[in-house]
Amino acid sequence: MESIAAKLAMLQDQVARVLALAKKRGASAAEAGAHLDEGLSVSARLGEAESIEYHRDQKLAITVYMGQRKGSASTSDLSPTSLEETVEAACAIARFANEDRYAGLPDPEKLAWEPPDLDLYHPWEIDPDQALERAIECEAEALQFDPQIVNSEGATLTSHHGIRVLGNTHGFLHGYPASRHSLSCVVVGRRGEEMQRDHWYTVARDSKELESPACCGRKAAERTIARLGARPLNTRTCPVIYAAEVATSLIGHFLAAIRGGNLYRQASFLLDSLERQVFPEFVHIHEEPHLRKGLGSAPYDSEGVATYPHDLVQNGKVKSYILGTYSARKLGLVTTGNAGGVHNVLVDPGPLDFQDLIREMGTGLVVTELIGHGVNLVTGDYSRGAVGFWVENGEIQHPVEEITIAANLKKMFHELLAIGRDVDRRGNIQTGSIWLSNMTVAGSPLKH
């Protein structure tokens, strides 16, 4: 079997080749990226194998610049002939494109000439039989957890690894391998005529850091049982706690609002927000792209610009936007190494755990699932379907469904009351539960 080093060298050679071809065909500058991804995915349902899939995907994309004119093309065929045709297509597009004075490669001094090793590659030597065994164990634990668990939508195990290579005509050429493994389970509960479903998943760069199959299955079952007996609420205004697994979406809306593309298009409710108070003073949000084994870690962004730790929010004030080279130039600013997105956004936790937050809130709503996409990034207006629990006297009283929660994100951020220490570390955005001041809770389902 071809080694990872050999595959990396092969992709680097192909990227170098297309960059040389672009220069030969008259490009003033060019950048190219290639990836090769491979993996295994298995699903089991009711103790039997449901699917076994092997994945292999490869692609090379190139962007060429003819002065300030830009053209891009891509291919999944990495043969020499196909690569030549792809370069020619990109050059042809650039020749007919409109000039854009902001287009071009990043400044050379911004590139990651000495990228750090972030320990992202941990391949899992697991065969389909072993993978199915784990998936079946996960589901079996969920099914035997409680007699009210009556059915399953199955358990799925995935194991993927890949290589990314990036190069440009400034002389930057680098690549690295990375891995990602996950296990998930979805089960159905029944009480009388009512049925509910819920899920759980675990994900990591290193398979040794996944939760056990039994633990994953048990959490899926616990969450499903907890939802039985759900009912709507009458329309009211009350405090709301977003459980950690959905609180990440709130931070995601904030990140979208300070993303360069939305800012230069005037499509954000946080225009001109640098150094402005958006959150209470205790809120600290920062990007840590160099966490070893981090799910969002990266030594450089999709342009090769070096990533670096920095504050997005400090003492509640916006300290940095999220910028790639193009959006930074449009705004008269400097890239933050975020072309292609963010890398490990951490929200500092407070002293209270989830149960503490519930006790402190006293009466209100806990949200554990969101439905629909009712967010207007231009105005900040927010309205989404929700599922969760009603709280009185600092204790959960009953599960809730068929409700809509609404407010404005500016107000929600400004009136944020606390961040829990129950941090969900399963993604690129990591935060604890978030307790918000009053929101409108409407006792009717969100219309789709």
Image: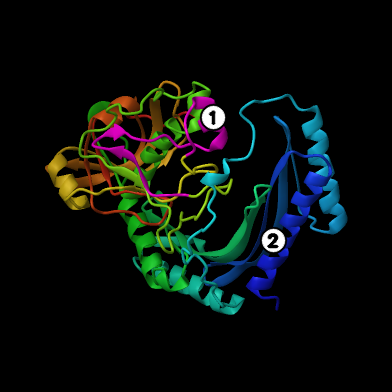
As drawn, the label of residue 177 is none
Q: For the point 36% across and 41% down, which residue is it?
A: 387
What count of labels does the image hold? 2
SS category of the residue bearing label 1: helix
Q: For the point 41% across and 23% down, which residue is it?
A: 271
Q: For the point 77% across and 55% down, which residue is it?
A: 17
The image shows residue 173, relative to residue 93, as above or below, that is below
Residue 313 locus on image (x, y percent): 31, 38
The earlier-in-sequence mark between 2 and 1 is: 2
What residue is shown with label 1?
A: 329
The answer to if 329 sits in the magenta stretch is yes
Cα gap from disc 2 to disc 1, whole angstroms:
29 Å
Q: For the point 41% across and 39% down, which residue is it?
A: 252
292 or 303, which lies in front? 303
What residue is shown with label 2?
A: 12
SS category of the residue bearing label 2: helix
Quadrant location, the N terminus: bottom right
Residue 59 locus on image (x, y percent): 71, 54
Tell me which amino acid carries mark 1: Arg
Tell me which amino acid carries mark 2: Gln
- Tell me if residue 395 can be seen: no
Based on the displayed image, in which of its 4 quarters is residue 405 positioned? top left
The image shows residue 120, relative to residue 224, as above or below, that is below
Q: Is residue 60 left or right of residue 238?
A: right
The answer to if 330 sits in the magenta stretch is yes
Q: Please report the bounds of the magenta region as a residue range.
A: 307-335
Based on the displayed image, in which of its 4 quarters is residue 235 positioned? top left
